[in-house]
């Protein structure tokens, strides 16, 4: 196995395994990679078909909190004219190597790419009951206590209850609270608004649920607000992970409104990633 051949790269809820060499009759297993609270493996074997297995690492976590995964797989060759094989959406409990296998009727040899996109991950309770997602769904938080706290905080901000600060922007004014801002900036009482930590948390949050439906919007926001980590993540998602193929219809409209310098940076990323 070539060096780096077993490493799986991840971003947001997407995992990608680039396989440099795979013969007509062989077996390979990836290094573990983490999505959610579990470590995962991808394994491939070839007989008549290419068989792809996805399974969690055997551990206490996967035994006591087995995952119910909803996901899509995509296999593509790594040449200049890429061909794709895309699976249906699968949803099932995954515990062992044999719990999921996808046979792909392909003649790919040599270098090719396997993508796994996790649409949702739930914890299956051992004592029965409904599986619960580890990720917030449509803005709803899992914890009732957190939900109640967020509601109170939201009302305080929306109605400017006891607001003691006014932020002036180009689009108008915003009422705020010194106490809340000061928790993110120990020097907020001066004229140096050091909120770097808060900015990084926001970028990480936006990267966590990056997907084909929001990546172009977030790329534009990252460029507009100089969020360099988010911008790099969006470009990586689009070009290194090949999700640009999923947004081909939206790209034309995006280019009509995007900043010229951003477009140049995107083309530069294309040249860098697809350089032979």
Image (cartoon, rainbow, N blue to C red):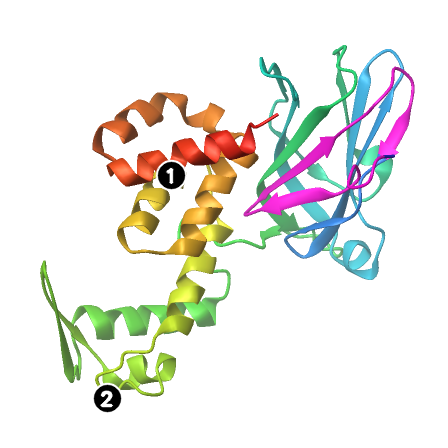
Rendered position, 134 above or below 27: below
Residue 211 placement, left or right of 172: right
Residue position for label 1 = 265
Extent of the magenta region = 2-28
Residue 42 is drawn in which quadrant?
top right
Residue 86, percent across and down?
Answer: 61, 20
- Neighbourhood count class around disc 1 (C-alpha, 10 Å): few under 14, some 14–19, many 20 upward: few
Q: Residue at x 37, y 83 (%)?
A: 183
Q: Residue at x 30, y 73 (%)?
A: 153
Residue 82, percent across and down?
Answer: 59, 16
Pick the front one: 150 or 27 = 27
Q: Nearer the viewer, mark 2 or mark 1?
A: 1
Rendered position, 263 above or below 246: below
Instruction: Check disc 2 and report its element: helix, strand or loop.
Output: loop
Instruction: Check disc 1 and report its element: helix, strand or loop.
Output: helix
User: Residues under labels 2 and 1: Cα distance?
Assistant: 36 Å
Count of labels shown? 2
Q: Quadrant of the N terminus?
A: top right
Rendered position, 91 above or below 65: above
- Neighbourhood count class around disc 2 (C-alpha, 10 Å): few under 14, some 14–19, many 20 upward: few
Residue 69 placement, left or right of 138: right
Q: Is residue 93 visible?
A: yes
Residue 74 covered by magenta stretch:
no
Pick the front one: 264 or 180 = 264
Q: Could you say which disc has been placed on residue 190 in the image?
A: 2
Residue 6 is drawn in which quadrant?
top right
Q: Is residue 213 visible?
A: no
Q: Residue at x 79, y 16 (%)?
A: 109
Q: Quadrant of the C terminus?
A: top right
Residue 151, percent across and down?
Answer: 32, 68
Residue 163, percent across and down?
Answer: 17, 81
């Amino acid at each position: 196995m070539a060096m780096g051949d077993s490493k799986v790269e991840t971003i947001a809820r997407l995992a990608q395994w680039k396989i440099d060499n795979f013969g007509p009759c062989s077996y390979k297993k990836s290094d573990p990679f983490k999505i959610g609270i579990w470590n995962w493996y991808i394994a491939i074997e070839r007989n008549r078909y290419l068989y792809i297995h996805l399974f969690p690492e055997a551990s206490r976590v996967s035994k006591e909190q087995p995952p119910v995964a909803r996901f899509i797989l995509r296999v593509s060759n790594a040449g200049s004219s890429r061909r794709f094989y895309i699976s249906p959406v699968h949803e099932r409990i995954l515990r062992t190597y044999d719990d999921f296998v996808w046979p792909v009727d392909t003649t790919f040899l040599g270098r090719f790419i396997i993508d796994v996109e996790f649409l949702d991950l739930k914890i299956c309770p051992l004592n029965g009951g409904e599986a619960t997602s580890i990720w917030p769904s449509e803005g709803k938080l899992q914890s009732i206590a957190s939900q109640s706290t967020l509601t109170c905080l939201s009302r305080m901000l929306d109605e400017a209850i006891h607001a003691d600060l006014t932020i002036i922007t180009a689009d108008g004014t915003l009422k705020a609270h010194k106490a809340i801002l000061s928790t993110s900036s120990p020097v907020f009482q001066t004229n140096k608004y050091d909120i770097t930590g808060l900015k990084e948390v926001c970028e990480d949050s936006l990267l966590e649920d990056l997907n084909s439906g929001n990546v172009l919007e977030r790329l534009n926001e990252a460029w507009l607000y100089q969020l360099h980590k988010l911008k790099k993540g969006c470009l990586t998602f689009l070009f290194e992970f090949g999700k640009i193929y999923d947004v081909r219809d939206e790209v034309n409209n995006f280019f009509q409104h995007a900043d010229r310098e951003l477009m140049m940076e995107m083309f530069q990323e294309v040249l860098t990633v697809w350089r032979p």
